[in-house]
């Protein structure tokens, strides 16, 4: 008999995917007014170099003035930074070697701007898989993993 809770370390948020935070459109490691201005210039049709994925601050799949405004509000301290949390972890309490186990959880962004997070599924200290959660402000995403025990 395999004691799944004893070997399932946790379902943790891993490092952000991509390497830079949402809103850091020039990828300099800092979200600043420069990033907000670059988004506005991009929207005005100016020839600027930005990471378009990071410019979608509200994570709705489009870059528009809402993204520039959210970024400005974050910089001014009006909205909170993204803060992803994992909840509703569901895993079997035990399994036989060779059994299929299903693990699921919900990732929630409690912050005021979007985030992209890696959700790491770990078993006995080893990362089995990483799913990517692309979360809008106050957004949630369910993530799951199905694996056979050894």
Image (cartoon, rainbow, N blue to C red):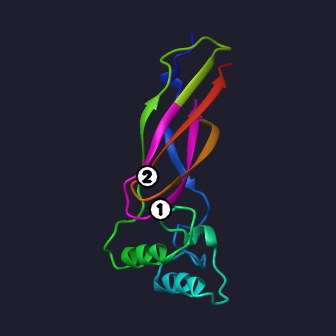
Q: Residues within 10 Å of mark 1 (few under 14, many from 20)?
A: many
Nearest the viewer among 47 and 29 is 47
Tell me: residue 133, above or below residue 9: below
Q: Does residue 43 appear in this view? A: yes
Earlier in the chain: of badge 1 and badge 2, it is 1
- The label number, if any, that marks residue 114 in the structure image: 1
Instruction: State the residue at coordinates (56%, 85%).
Output: 38
- The label number, if any, that marks residue 139 in the structure image: 2
Nearest the viewer among 128 and 64 is 64
Left or right of residue 53: residue 89: left
Left or right of residue 142: residue 52: right
Q: Does residue 9 appear in this view? A: no
Instruction: State the residue at coordinates (52%, 21%).
Output: 4
- The label number, if any, that marks residue 42 in the structure image: none
Q: Position of residue 71 (x, y in %)?
A: 44, 75
The quarter of the displayed image where residue 99 is located: top right
Question: Magenta stretch?
Answer: 104-125
Q: Please tell me whether mark 1 sits on a helix, a strand or a loop.
A: loop
Instruction: State the residue at coordinates (58%, 78%).
Output: 28
Left or right of residue 19: residue 22: left
Q: Are marks 1 and 2 in contact (CB under 8 Å)?
A: yes
Q: CA distance from mark 1 to mark 2?
A: 8 Å
């Amino acid at each position: 008999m395999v004691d799944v809770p004893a070997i399932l370390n946790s379902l943790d948020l891993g490092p952000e995917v991509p390497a830079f935070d949402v809103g850091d459109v020039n990828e300099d490691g800092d979200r600043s007014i420069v990033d907000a201005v670059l988004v506005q210039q991009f929207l005005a049709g100016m020839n600027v170099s930005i990471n378009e994925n990071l410019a979608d601050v509200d994570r709705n799949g489009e870059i528009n003035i809402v993204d520039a405004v959210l970024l400005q509000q974050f910089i001014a301290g009006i909205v909170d930074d993204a803060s992803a949390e994992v909840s509703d972890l569901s895993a079997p309490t035990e399994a036989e070697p060779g059994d299929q186990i299903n693990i699921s959880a919900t990732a929630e962004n409690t912050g005021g701007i979007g985030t992209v997070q890696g959700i790491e599924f770990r078993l006995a200290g080893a990362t089995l898989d990483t799913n990517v959660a692309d979360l809008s402000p106050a957004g949630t995403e369910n993530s799951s993993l199905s694996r056979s025990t050894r």
